[in-house]
Image (cartoon, grey):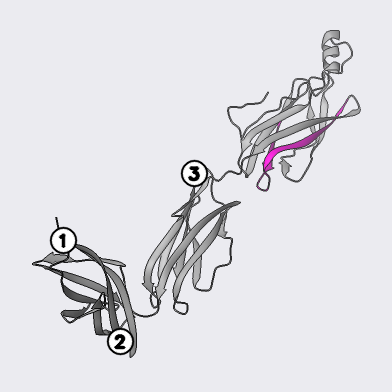
Amino acid sequence: MIDRTNPLICYAMLSSLLLLVSNGCDDSNAMQGLDTELTGVIDLGVIQPDVTSGQFVITCHDPAGTVISDLKPSCGCTTIENRLPRQLDQGESATFNFSFDATKMFGDIKKRITVIEYRSKAQVQHEIQILAKVDRSLNATISPDSINLGHFGCWEPIECKIKIQRVGRPIRKCGLLNVLPDWLSAQVRDLSEFQKYVDFIIDRSHTPGKFREQVVIGADDEKLTCLIEGYAHEGPFITSSVIAGKFSQGTWDFVIPVKHAPDELIEIQSIKIDEVSLSNWKMNSKGKTQSDVYLNYDGTNLNQKLLNLTINVIQGGVQAEVSSKLILQKPG
């Protein structure tokens, strides 16, 4: 009988397999034993690609007893806890534990265990079948599955991390499955047996520009992907593509953050909005890697408009141009 209440513990009662051989026993029982040689079945049901444990029970109904001499699995994926030879008297039972390794399997599986016994001075063999369906559907999750770093400077390595987790089954191994470019490094860090962190460091100091990298991570035999993208600037840049202004008495006041390499202050040469040169601006240093440009723009006759902003700067003796968009919209 199979206990289906627990898929990890299954029982195959093989009383029908051990044929009733006895002189002087009831004829009907003897005929029933001789005519009913059934095959024991252990149905593990739907299992994960992992090591699953179970057990089966052999009961002797022969008055002369029997000796279980060997238990032979059909392949190396099944391991049996052998305590053989095992002698059984009439009515006595023996329980045998086994483990079934399905880590490299998928779909419907059928394996066999051959039971070899000596009964009434003769060798008798029986077969136990192990049935299972290995489910390889994804049950590990990755969060986030995409990371957009936006705009940043080549001089500042960026750190980010993702979490790999699984409910109900530990993650035995976790690691990168694809070769990363030299500007992207990663390290797996344990949170618990069910959760891992993958820590990334993006260093674009020698490779400025736009990037888009698909990272493939394996959690045991499952494949998870994370998309990492962004834009690394070699020279100064404006951190935001859209800058909104503050409207007051017919003019807009803007604070424009310009990022630049550390300890190299920038010098503004000129500022233009839609090719119109401006003169009413000032600049303050804001830490080692940012300078704020304060700009006042006369837009008395404008209601709403998207404008192009261009700032020519010098940093470290090198001239550069940074650009962005301005949105002008009166309140209310």
Residue shown at 72% from the left, 24% from the top: 13
Q: Which badge, 2 or 3, comes first in the chain's sequence?
A: 3
Position in image of residue 69 (x %, y %)? 83, 35
Q: Which badge, 1 or 2, comes first in the chain's sequence?
A: 2
Within the magenta stretch, is there residue 50? no
The answer to whether residue 303 is above or below residue 210 is above
Which stretch did the figure color magenta?
Answer: 95-119
* Front disc: 1 or 2: 1
Which secondary structure type mostly characterizes the magenta part of the structure? Answer: strand
Looking at the rendered structure, the kind of residue marked 1 is Lys
Q: Which badge, 1 or 3, comes first in the chain's sequence?
A: 3
Q: Residue 214 carries which label?
A: none
Query: In the rendered image, is residue 203 in sight?
Result: no
Looking at the rendered structure, the kind of residue marked 2 is Ile
Decide if residue 78 is on the left or right side of residue 148: right
Image quadrant occupied by the N terminus: top right
The answer to whether residue 17 is above or below residue 129 is above
Q: Badge 2 is on which residue?
A: 314
* Front disc: 1 or 3: 1
Q: Residue 330 carries which label?
A: 1
The answer to whether residue 273 is above or below residue 189 is below
For mark 2, does the 10 Å Cα neighbourhood hold few (<14), some (14 to 19), or many (20 or more) residues? some
Are the two marked residues, 1 and 2, in contact with CB atoms closer than 8 angstroms? no
Q: Residue furthest left?
A: 249
The answer to whether residue 75 is above or below residue 33 is below
Are the two marked residues, 1 and 3, in contact with CB atoms closer than 8 angstroms? no
For mark 1, does the 10 Å Cα neighbourhood hold few (<14), some (14 to 19), or many (20 or more) residues? some
Position in image of residue 312 (x %, y %)? 29, 82
Q: Badge 3 is on which residue?
A: 167
Residue shown at 85% from the left, 16% from the top: 35
Looking at the rendered structure, the kind of residue marked 3 is Val
